[in-house]
Image (cartoon, grey):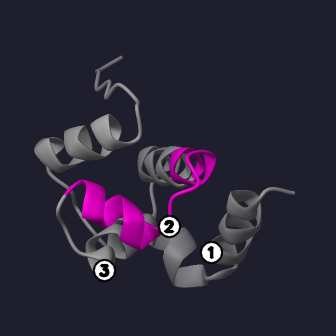
């Protein structure tokens, strides 16, 4: 089991987290954490790359943030990813 899968399993045990998180948010958080871990980055290292605080990354990864598209774009670039937002 990957580090992220273990973290996800633990987060989903929290009733408040599970109730408040939407499928889209969970997919975003999952993708962010998996990408960060693939790059071997800590929250602090990722924060330094986009000139923010580690606590901002932690809030996003815990589902306690509502990031702007600009913030998500910075994260995507720092992780070597492409941000895609669409309506289906």
Q: Is residue 59 left or right of residue 14?
A: left
**What residue is shown at x 29% (from left), y 21% (from top)?**
86
Q: Nearer the viewer, mark 2 or mark 1?
A: 2
**What residue is shown at x 51% (from left), y 71% (from top)?**
19
Residue 52 at what x, y percent from top left? 19, 67
Give the mark nearer the N terminus: 2 vs 1. Answer: 1
Q: Look at the picture and state if 38 lies above or below 54.
A: above
Distance of label 1 from label 3 (alpha carbons): 17 Å
**What residue is shown at x 71% (from left), y 76% (from top)?**
10
Q: Nearer the viewer, mark 1 or mark 3?
A: 3
Q: Look at the picture and state if 69 lies above or below 62.
A: above
Q: Quadrant of residue 9?
A: bottom right
Give the mark nearer the N terminus: 3 vs 2. Answer: 2
Closest to the observer, 45 or 12: 45
Q: Look at the picture and state if 67 lies above or below 23.
A: below
Q: Circles 3 and 2: CB distance less than 8 Å?
A: no
Q: Residue 42, labelled with which disc?
A: 2
Q: Nearer the viewer, mark 3 or mark 2?
A: 2
In the rendered structure, does residue 43 fall within the stretch colored magenta? yes
Residue identifier under label 1: 11
**What residue is shown at x 40% (from left), y 29% (from top)?**
81
Q: Main secondary structure of the magenta part?
A: helix
Closest to the observer, 72 or 16: 72
Q: Residue 55, labelled with which disc?
A: 3
């Amino acid at each position: 089991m990957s580090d992220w899968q273990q973290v996800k399993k633990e987060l989903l045990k929290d009733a408040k987290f599970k109730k408040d998180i939407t499928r889209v948010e969970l997919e975003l958080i999952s993708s962010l954490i998996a990408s960060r871990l693939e790059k071997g980055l800590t929250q602090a290292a990722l924060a330094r790359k986009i000139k923010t605080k580690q606590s901002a990354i932690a809030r996003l990864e815990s589902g306690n943030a509502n990031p702007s598209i600009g913030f998500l774009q910075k994260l995507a670039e720092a992780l070597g990813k492409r941000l895609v937002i669409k309506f289906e």
